[in-house]
Image (cartoon, rainbow, N blue to C red):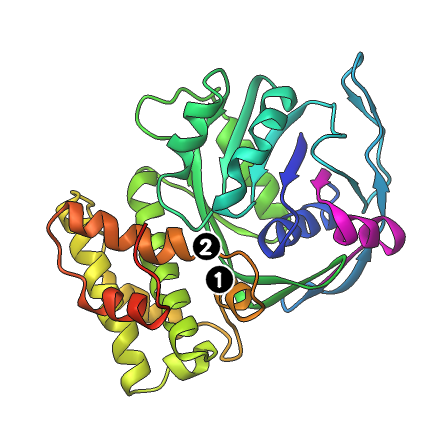
Amino acid sequence: MKYLIAGTGGVGGSIAGFLALAGKEVTCIARGEHLKAMLDKGLILHSTLKGEYAIPAKEQSCSSAENKVEKQEYPSINACTAEAYTGKADVIFVCVKGYSVESITSMIKRAAHANTIVIPILNVYGTGPRIQREVPGVTVLDGCIYIVGFVSAPGEITQMGQIFRLVYGAHKGTVVAPGLMEAVQKDLQESGIKVDISPDINRDTFVKWSFISAMAVTGAYYGVPMGEVQKTGEIRDTFIGLSRESAALGAKLGIAFKEDQVAYNLKVIDKLAPESTASMQKDMARGHQSEVQGLLFDMITAAKEQGIPTPTYEKVARKFNVSPQ
């Protein structure tokens, strides 16, 4: 199968790197200095799970008439901008930030064929249905990922720690070609990624939103890595407070949690590399555009709509001197 990775940051770059090392056919969408560095020296992967690799990258070359990607030599990747891509993909992983989703919907429409599946891997809840509304003729699933991955330099991806787990599934009413989700799962597992096909992706994407929101907000509020959240004290208590408030929202929305959400969030945070930080925290520290709207303010807004108090979230919002939009 042909894989298209829309957004070759920490998440997309890790997925692309692992797939390519297993001999899968991968095209990465990137731009600017990141794309240039990949084409010049390959996709550099620093991985706790895989080791150190420089995966050769070549500019994606395909004919819009034939919709045929140039045959790859493995392990290698194709790479280009969204505008330059004119091929067809069997699986499209959407790994851009939430605020960039609209920028790649036209590419999804061009790249999809009758049986293509789109798997969004974002931190923000409700992404699958959001993309589906934009591309009504394409089969859009939903998904989430547990990984510490980031761009450590142009063209370089760092995957840190022992956790690399991907969850995806179809929302109720979404029809997927028989065996396709299982075929993707097999490819990913052969690449060294832990994969679960979710019977309740609405629940599982909410669970991820609850966790990453608490993780990113706590880290950004105190300006600390996750090792500080793993210690007993005020910082951990803030993480717990955020987790309780999002769990209350989930319960009000009818999410059927498999286990206590606060206990689950603590279990996951305690498995992270102590030096790890969330991408939102990194972006805010650098003065870059971040997912603060989706991970902080959208949580407050959703809770208010359901009558759920969020004193911990509102305390953090005051720290940033910004009101929910």
- Is 157 left, or right, of 147 in this rendering? right
Q: Left or right: 162 with respect to 233? A: right
Kind of residue sitting beneath label 2? Glu
Residue shown at 36% from the left, 72% from the top: 218
- Locate residue 169, reporting x and y percent: 41, 36
Give the residue at mark 2.
Answer: 291
Q: Residue at x 39, y 71 (%)?
A: 269
Which of disc 2 and disc 1 is earlier in sequence?
Answer: 1
Please say if the residues under marks 1 and 2 sit with CB atoms less than 8 Å apart: yes
Closer to the camera in the image, 78 or 309: 309
Residue 26 in percent (x, y) is at 72, 38
Residue designated by label 1: 280
Q: Position of residue 201 (x, y in %)?
A: 34, 39
Could you give the CA–CA distance between mark 1 and mark 2, rounded to whole angstroms?
6 Å
Q: Residue furthest top?
A: 65
Q: Which quadrant, please, contains the N terminus?
A: top right
80 up-or-down from 262: above or below:
above
Q: Where residue 122 sits in the image (x, y, percent)?
A: 47, 47
Could you say which is closer to the camera, residue 263 or residue 94? 94
The magenta span reads 25-45
Specify the quadrant of the image occupied by residue 295: bottom left
